[in-house]
Amino acid sequence: MDANFAASPWPKVCDKFKHEFGQHAYTTWLGQLGYQGVDSGTVELTAPTKFVRDWITRHYAPRLKDYFLAEDPRIKGLSIRLAARQAAAGARPAERAPVSPVEVDPSTGADESAALDPKYTFDSFVVGKSNELAYAAAKRIAESGEVTFNPLFLHGGVGLGKTHLMHAIAWEVKRQNPTKRVVYISAEKFMFEFIAALRFKDTHAFKQKFRAVDLLMVDDVQFIANKESTQEEFFHTFNALVDNRCQVVITADRSPTDLEGIQERIISRLGWGLVADIHPTDYELRLGILQSKAEQAESVIVPAEVLEFLARRITSNVRELEGALNRVMAYATLVGRPITMDMTRDVLQDLIRANDRKLTIDEIQRAVADYFNLRLAEMLSERRARNIARPRQVAMYLSKQLTSRSLPEIGRRFGGRDHTTVMHAVRKIEDLRRDDSQLDDDISRLTRLLEG
């Protein structure tokens, strides 16, 4: 048998397949085959599963035979057999190995090491009051091996540790049981993968990929808001996994009941299991995170007063907090100077100035909703009743006044509204403040509350 991969027609066959059927179909199907060589005029290929073998035999075998004949007229036939588990290592993959136990980005075929950050483990996660429930729940899922609450829904603002916990779950599950199928993907890429499956009429493969797993983790589910077809597929995938007692972990920037543009039946199911809110960090937790990171630095010493200063002044999120410390340590290393308070203030003057008045749109929305006794989902909805529309305009006005966000960005955070809607709201509130003393007083109180 001629099993010389480099000299075989296989690479050219793969190129022809990609050209005719596209990269997506290649990655999903042909990319999982192993080329063994040619025996008595028959091309010998191996497939990792019966499903893959049968699908390729039904849909692509005739075209594959044509490709091989074009490269070598002596080819008489094509054989696709199942790869024995013991011999799997000896099979030559077309371009990549069959799906790994932790598949991170199905749309690109990226392997786990490229997308799962090795720093994001349970050991490196600093626990405090604001995140202890989310941490304990993630730990339970990763270590128990059983479905205890389904789904686990983690929600909180940007940079508070949601993605860190999802990566930690994947690493721990992989460590304890390498054979388990774990898929971690962002909701946005789930949508792109589904659109590609529709385009290439390959939805069966899409369903197989996401429903034949032990653990599915979807990050930032708010991104499928108002995407009806994607939500339909997500709903059925979710149900299939839960019915099979497979664990699902979901993250979002807000609680299920506050998600706008998501079908009610999906919201209902997201609340079935455990909903854990990751709150903004307090001073003690920020200091603990900085201390943990500083202890890992080998080439530079960070004084305690600098860590305490950063914990007090950088309050937006953990990601920015760690970035500030990295900037200080990098500067000290590059210029060969010890870290001092003066140097820290000088290096981080732009960041410190921004954090002196930095508020998030999420914080403003929640504060305004609470002040006017509304549910956040009501304020972000399409309803135009005065008791809802006016607080919405106030929140848009404060978002413009108290943050550096652009009008289009503010509009997107208010249910995907146009920037002209935000502009109208700002002008309306400015006009009303001159004539309505009660509204002016409400806005002044809200401003003090938010800035305090």
Image (cartoon, grey):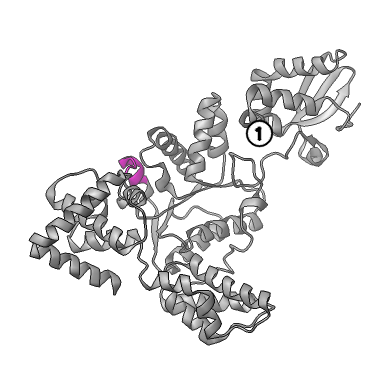
Within the image, what quadrant is residue 123 found in? bottom right
Percent position (x, y) of residue 279?
Answer: 39, 66
Percent position (x, y) of residue 244?
Answer: 49, 41
Residue nearest the observer in this picture, 352 or 229: 352
Compared across the picture, whether 258 is left or right of 60 comes to left
How many labels, in total?
1
Q: Which residue sits at x=25%, y=71%?
A: 449
Is residue 71 at least partly visible in the picture? Answer: yes
Residue nearest the observer in this picture, 260 or 182: 260
Residue nearest the observer in this picture, 133 or 111: 111
Q: Which residue sits at x=63%, y=84%?
A: 338
Is residue 128 at least partly visible in the picture? Answer: no
Within the image, what quadrant is residue 99 found in? top right
Q: Which residue is mark 1?
A: 27
* Residue type (three-letter) at the residue carrying disc 1: Thr
Percent position (x, y) of residue 100?
Answer: 67, 45
Magenta region: which residues? 261-269
Q: Is residue 206 above or below residue 327?
A: above
